[in-house]
Amino acid sequence: MALHQRGAVAAGRKRTIRANGGPGRTRDPVQLGVHGALHRALALRALALRPEARRAVDALHGELGRAGLLRPPARLRAARALLACVPLTVAAGLLVSWAPRGRGGGYGGVSPVATLVVALLPVLLAAALLRLPPATRAARQLLARLRERHPLPAHRREVTDGRLVQLYVALYGDPALAMFLPRFSRDGGLLDRPREADENRPPPEPGGRTGHAAP
């Protein structure tokens, strides 16, 4: 967004983003990382996976985590570890349940049903960890306060300060992009993400206004 405002990036062919000169006078690591990743025109998803952009975004996530606004990525590692334990738990339970009792003969121990129940526990715990939103409660409260203080304008002509445009995009996501940068966001593929994956989308307002404006 800020790079495009300075003319450092532009929409490429087939819904891609391309570099359009140097990054300009900025020391922002995310902007520098994104611009440095644009050795050629890239789609948004491919750009997000480039090492230069990924490192800058990960560093920003770390700062937000230390500020208490994002949950640490350790929850994802814990969820993966729990899921990795499921095959071992099932295998161990089946071995115990099918093991011979000894002199009395026969098989016994843990029943297959009990083994299945025990194996489901890590799955349930992992699902609970994965369902936690990345943003903390403090972050959601801060976002709500900022949106209340800075409601999305009805039309882009109401805003002439480029820094305010960046603020609205940060607060409202796609609706603000579509309002203030309709051509760049459309031709650059910035609005191609699944709508249900955008957690930065404000709820519809009374009367059907969602923040979108005609290009």
Image (cartoon, grey):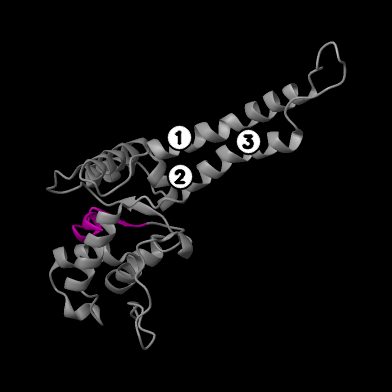
Residue 110 x %, y %: 72, 28
Residue of label 1: 78
What amino acid is found at the position of numbered circle 3 in the picture? Val
Which residue is located at x 23 percent, y 49 percent? 21
Mark 3–mark 1 distance (CA, rounded to whole Å): 18 Å
Q: Earlier in the sequence, mark 2 or mark 1?
A: 1
**Camera-side mark, 3 or 1:** 3
- Measure the alpha-carbon separation of dots 2 and 1: 8 Å
Q: Can you say whether 66 is above or below 163 in the image?
A: above
Q: Kindly indicate the quadrant of the structure image that contains residue 60.
A: top left
- CA distance separating discs 2 and 3: 18 Å
Q: Secondary structure at mark 3?
A: helix
Q: Position of residue 206 (x, y in %)?
A: 35, 86
Residue for point 55% across, 44% down: 124
Q: In which quadrant will I find the N terminus?
A: bottom left
Q: Quadrant of residue 64?
A: top left
Q: Quadrant of the C terminus?
A: bottom left
**Residue nearest the viewer, comparing 56 with 18:** 56
Residue 49 horizontal/vertical position (percent): 41, 41
The magenta-colored residue range is 1-11
- Look at 37% across and 39% down and name the residue there: 73
Residue sitting at x 70%, y 36%: 114
Q: Are marks 2 and 1 in contact (CB under 8 Å)?
A: yes
Mark 2 is on which residue type?
A: Leu
Residue furthest to the right in view is: 105
Q: Which residue is mark 2?
A: 129
Instruction: Give the residue number, with chain letter if any, for mark 3.
Output: 118
Relative to residue 45, is residue 213 drawn left or right?
left
Mark 3 surroundings within 10 Å by alpha-carbon count, few (fewer than 14), some (14 through 19), many (20 or more):
some
